């Protein structure tokens, strides 16, 4: 109901907001009656997605160039870093809700593939176990997701970062008592504004 100029200013302000927050708002504007606002929202979403896709293309090119000598990477650490960055970038497409449907599924699977490649070489990487859990959770593979969450916790990731996700798994399967116990294990909620 706001005047179009106020809505336009709000849209411009969204360029300074994180993609995770801006994307759902921009998607909502795609059905706005104003063609100018719809075009601006589409352009902003497209720009966010293109930036990440360009970074993915650069990482894939670097990874291919690295393995160009008979498929043997010249530097294992550099290869692992490229794989980790690729997992990060594909995850960003999902996390920022820039892809939907089949593209979302593809981004999840690619992020998982690169994440698992790094975990083979670095099985003690707690944040990547956490990422793997979230990706498996998104693919509706709850048992494997639970195992990854447990690995992340066992490897030292703070409970405040891990416990909400196993609690969500419990909630989704209808185990409300365990979901409640997991959430209560987090301690005082006011210390967790992000949650």
Image (cartoon, rainbow, N blue to C red):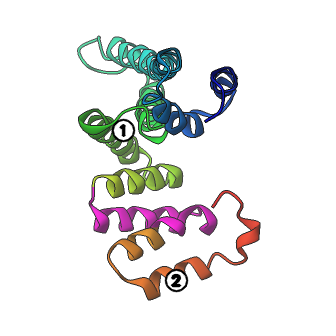
Q: Which residue lies under the disc numbered 1?
A: 111
Q: Which mark is residue 180?
A: 2
Residue plotted at (61% across, 82% down): 184
> Residue placed at 35% from the left, 11% from the top?
65
Residue 194 quadrant = bottom right
Tell me if residue 8 is in the magenta stretch.
no
Indicate left or right for 47 with 65 as reference.
right
Report x, y in % for residue 144: 30, 63
Q: Secondary structure at mark 2?
A: helix
Residue at 39% across, 47% down: 119
Above/below status of 69 relative to 5: above
Q: For the C terminus, which image quadrant?
A: bottom right
State the image quarter where residue 129 is shown. bottom left
Quarter-wise, where is residue 108 in the image? top left
Residue 99 placement, left or right of 48:
left
Q: Nearer the viewer, residue 106 or 125?
A: 106
Left or right of 44? Residue 123 is: left
Residue 78 location (% of width, % of height): 47, 25
Rendered view: 51 above or below 173? above
Residue 51: image x %, image y %?
49, 17
Location of the N terminus by quadrant is top right
Magenta residues (range): 140-165
**Foreground: 160 or 194?**
194
Badge 1: few (under 14), some or many (20 or more) residues near its Cα, within 10 Å?
A: many
Q: Main secondary structure of the magenta part?
A: helix
* 163 is within the stretch colored magenta: yes
Disc 2: CA contacts within 10 A as few (<14), some (14-19) or many (>=20): some
Furthest toward the right, the residue is 191
Looking at the image, which is closer to me, 157 or 94? 94
Residue 30, image x, y percentages:
44, 28
Alpha carbon of mark 1 to alpha carbon of mark 2: how far?
30 Å
């Amino acid at each position: 109901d706001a005047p179009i100029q106020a809505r336009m200013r709000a849209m411009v302000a969204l360029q300074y907001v994180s993609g995770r927050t801006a994307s759902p708002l921009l998607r909502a504007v795609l059905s706005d009656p104003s063609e100018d606002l719809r075009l601006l929202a589409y352009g902003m979403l497209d720009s966010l997605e293109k930036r990440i896709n360009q970074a993915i293309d650069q990482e894939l090119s670097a990874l291919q160039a690295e393995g160009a000598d008979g498929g043997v990477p010249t530097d294992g650490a550099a290869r692992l870093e490229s794989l980790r960055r690729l997992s990060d970038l594909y995850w960003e497409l999902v996390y920022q809700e820039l892809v939907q449907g089949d593209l979302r599924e593809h981004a999840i699977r690619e992020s998982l593939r690169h994440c698992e490649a790094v975990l083979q070489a670095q099985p003690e990487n707690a944040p990547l176990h956490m990422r793997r859990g979230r990706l498996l959770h998104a693919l509706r593979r709850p048992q494997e997701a639970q195992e990854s969450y447990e690995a992340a916790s066992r490897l030292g990731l703070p409970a405040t970062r891990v416990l909400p996700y196993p609690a969500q798994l419990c909630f989704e399967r209808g185990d409300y008592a365990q979901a409640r116990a997991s959430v209560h294990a987090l301690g005082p909620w006011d210390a967790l504004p992000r949650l």
